[in-house]
Each structure stands twice: as C-alpha cells, then as structure tokens.
Image (cartoon, rainbow, N blue to C red):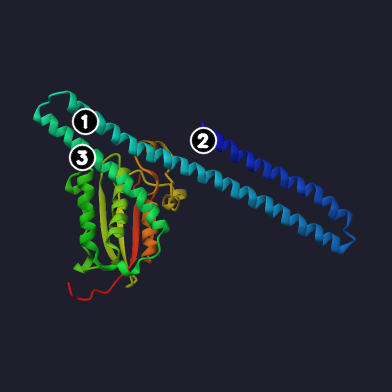
Amino acid sequence: MNLTRRRGAIALAITLGVLIVGGLIAFTLPWILLNERRFWLSILGIVLACLLIAGVVLNTIFLVREVRRNERQDSFMNAVTHELKTPIASIRLYLETLQRRELPEAQRQEFYRIMLADSGRLLTTVEQVLKAGELTHRARRDSERTMLELAPLVAECIAITLERNHLPAEAIQLAPVPGAVRLHVRAIAEDLRTAVLNILDNAVKYSPNGVHVTCAMAIVDYTQVALTVTDTGVGLAPSDLKRIFKRFYRVPGRIAVRVKGTGIGLFLVRTIAKQHGGSVAAVSPGPNQGTTITLMLPLAASDGSD
C-alpha cells in the first residue's frame, strides 16, 4: 500500500512539473512575441522563463529523490525490524520449550546450537547498524591505522563466513597471491575486517543455487592492492552495479524478498574503502551470471619487521 502511494506521489510530482512547465511556456511565448521589437523586454522574458522552468524542473527532481530516499529508509526500517524480531522470537520459543518440557540431552544441545546461531545473527545486525552510524559521523582516525598483511585477514574472514553459514571449506576458495608476494596495507583492522566480511556475506547470500566463491589478490599499477570476490550467484543488471553501494538500497525482485538483509552492508564497504583512500566496484555479465566485487586499497611497503 505504501509503495503504491509513493509511486502515485512520484507520478503526481512529475505530472505537476510537466503541467507547470507547459503553462510557463504557454504564457511566456506570447509575451516574447508581443515584445519582439523591444529587444530588452524579449531578453528579460526569455531569461525569466528559463529560470522559472529550471526551478520547476529542479524542484520536481528533488521531490522525486526525496520520495525515493524515504522509500529506501522505510525498507531499511522494515528489514531491520524483521532481522531483530525473527531471531528474538526464535530464541524465546526455544527457551519456553526448554522451560516447560524435559527434553533429551541431544535435543537440548540442538536447541542451544540454534539459539546461539540466532543470537549471532542478532548481534551481526546490531553491529551493522551501529557501524553504519559510527563510520558516517566520525572523523578520520589515521593514528589508529596499522600495517596489516591482507592475506591472513582475508583468510580469517573466510573462516568466519564459512562458520556462520555452515558451509564446507571448498565453498569459498582463496587463490594464492601471484609470486607469493606479501601484500600490506595501512588500515584499521576492525574496519577492514568489516568490509571483507560484508563482501563475502553478500556473495553467499545471493548464491541460492550453491555457494562457489573465489577470492583473489593482486597488485594493480604498482600502487594498489585489489581484492576480488567472485561468485556464481544471481548476478546484477547494469543499472544496479553502482546503486548497490548506496545506503539502504536493495536490488528489487523476488530474490531480494527472500534474501535477508538491511541494505547497508555494501554501503559500509564503500565508506570504509573511501576512508582508507581506496574504492570498490562491482562487475557482472548479467542476471544469473554471477558478480565480482573488487576492493581497491593503497599498497603499503612492508617495514620488514614481520
């Protein structure tokens, strides 16, 4: 219902904008024709008409953007509410069952495992929301950056992702660095770990027919290190390749409805990359053909102490 109302508001804004622009042209054109022999009045009429039309067009654009931004924020709130409510309801149900019934030890252990998984999901959602607010509003913390070797950090994130999603080790493969070079970056370890985990989590979530993810690292132009994460999942349309890094944005469609998420994971990746002097980009051959996300960071020279 809200979606229909917003689309109606967008259509109304565009329609009003078109009508107002048409009205301005209809009233201004006779003015110009009547005063065509008075050069300065004609010029004044043209300038005023252009300014009014530009103002109406800009106002319509800003109004449509605001409606769409509010739509994304509402979608984010709904997603967060679901992500918080579902594990809490699950944990409560299992706790009530454990309280009321005497269960075999094996079933009790299974309940404990499920509750731990739900609590982990709950904690992940809370951390994502808190991290989004923290990264958006805090100043740069250059003093907290340290020299990090990228390969061990990525391997750690892969292990965490495999454990969280109960995946076999072969589901996410880390290719060896060409030439066995040790790649270092200057970064805040916690933030960089968050970025890599979000990229991996996105690759896993959008691979409904089986997780086959490949991670690779390489030096680019002698000054940057590129981490590429390639999956064989649902892929992306060309129009979504940049939008997925916007805050609250989720790719529309049936897959997005089934996949759980808040729409801020890849926004965090982009924010962290920028704060570290890098960038992030997505490439996809098209829907159902997989996606490759590349995180670029400035390469740091190792001090040789490790």
- The mark closer to the camera, 3 or 1, is 1
Any part of residue 256 in sight? no
Question: Could you tell whether 22 is left or right of 89 in the image?
Answer: right
At x 77%, y 49%, the residue is: 25
At x 35%, y 53%, the residue is: 131
Q: Nearer the viewer, residue 195 or 233?
A: 195
- The mark closer to the camera, 3 or 2, is 3
Tell me the distance, in whole angstroms, between the alpha carbons under discs 1 and 2: 37 Å
In the image, residue 222 lies at what x, y percent? 32, 73
Q: In the rendered image of this protein, does residue 301 appear above or below residue 63?
A: below
Looking at the rendered structure, the kind of residue marked 1 is: Leu
Tell me the distance, in whole angstroms, between the alpha carbons under discs 3 and 1: 12 Å
- Mark with earlier residue (3, 1): 1
Residue bearing mark 1? 95
Looking at the rendered structure, the kind of residue marked 2 is: Leu
Q: Nearer the viewer, residue 257 or 90?
A: 90
Residue 294, by quadrant, is bottom left
- Mark with earlier residue (1, 2): 2
Q: Nearer the viewer, residue 142 or 19?
A: 142
Any part of residue 275 in sight? yes
> Cβ–Cβ below 8 Å for labels 1 and 2?
no
Looking at the rendered structure, the kind of residue marked 3 is: Leu
- Mark with earlier residue (3, 2): 2
- Residue 116's label in the rendered image is 3
> Cβ–Cβ below 8 Å for labels 3 and 1?
no
Residue bearing mark 2? 3
Residue located farthest toward the left when viewing the structure as drawn: 105
Residue located farthest toward the front when viewing the structure as drawn: 99
Q: Quadrant of the C terminus?
A: bottom left
At x 32%, y 70%, the residue is: 143
Tell me the distance, in whole angstroms, between the alpha carbons under discs 3 and 2: 36 Å
At x 19%, y 76%, the residue is: 304
